[in-house]
Image (cartoon, rainbow, N blue to C red):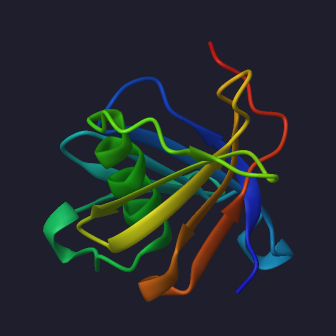
């Protein structure tokens, strides 16, 4: 499934993913605050026990990789595409591609989950 939206991360363990596409999920907001998960859609909001969310869930995979990457001290390898950093998280082995000059995320891959996320308009706040 192809999903597009806006990803916001203010600190380790947190993530907000606002979905724009596909049209059937437009307006869905998934929020992780480090302890709980909440879903919001068309004015309805409900909490989800994080233990019941499968490791393969989109947000949980991305959150796990970003948290794991924070603790990495290996600088990665510069390639023609950019800076490639490899590691592992609870979702499996991952690869992050970033701009070596700015640090902007370009792509995240988790092969075991068949997940590839491409980032555009990356901004540090």
Left or right position of 115 against 25: left
14 versus 26 height, above or below? above
> Where in the figure is residue 115, as x and y percent of width and height?
57, 78
Considering every residue shown, the one lying at the far top of the view is: 125
Q: Nearer the viewer, residue 108 or 16?
A: 108
Image point (65%, 27%), residue name = 103
Q: Nearer the viewer, residue 49 or 45?
A: 49
Q: Quadrant of residue 48?
A: bottom left
Q: Residue at x 29, y 76 (%)?
A: 55
Q: Position of residue 93 (x, y in %)?
A: 36, 72
Looking at the picture, tell me which residue is in the foreground, 119 or 98: 98
Is residue 49 visible in the rendered image? The answer is: no
Query: Image point 81% across, 75% down: which residue?
Result: 22
Specify the quadrant of the image occupied by residue 57: bottom left
Residue 42 visible to the viewer? yes
- Quadrant occupied by the N terminus: bottom right
Residue 10: % across, % down: 46, 23
Left or right, 62 with reference to 81? left
The residue sitting at the left extreme is: 51
In this view, 37 is above or below 124: below
The answer to which quarter of the image holds residue 104 is: top right
Residue 101 appears left or right of 83: right
Q: Nearer the viewer, residue 118 or 46?
A: 118
Location of the C terminus by quadrant is top right
- Residue at 74% x, 45% y is 82
């Amino acid at each position: 499934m192809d999903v597009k939206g806006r990803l916001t991360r203010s600190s380790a363990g947190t993530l907000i993913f606002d979905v724009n596409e596909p049209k059937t999920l437009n307006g869905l907001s998934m929020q992780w605050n480090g302890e709980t998960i909440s879903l919001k859609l068309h004015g309805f909001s409900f909490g989800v026990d994080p233990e019941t969310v499968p490791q393969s869930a989109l947000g949980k995979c991305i959150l796990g990789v970003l948290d794991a990457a924070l603790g990495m001290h290996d600088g990665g390898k510069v390639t023609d595409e950019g800076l490639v950093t490899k590691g592992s998280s609870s979702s499996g082995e991952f690869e992050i591609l970033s701009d070596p000059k700015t640090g902007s995320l370009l792509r995240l891959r988790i092969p075991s989950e068949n997940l590839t996320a491409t980032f555009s308009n990356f901004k540090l706040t």
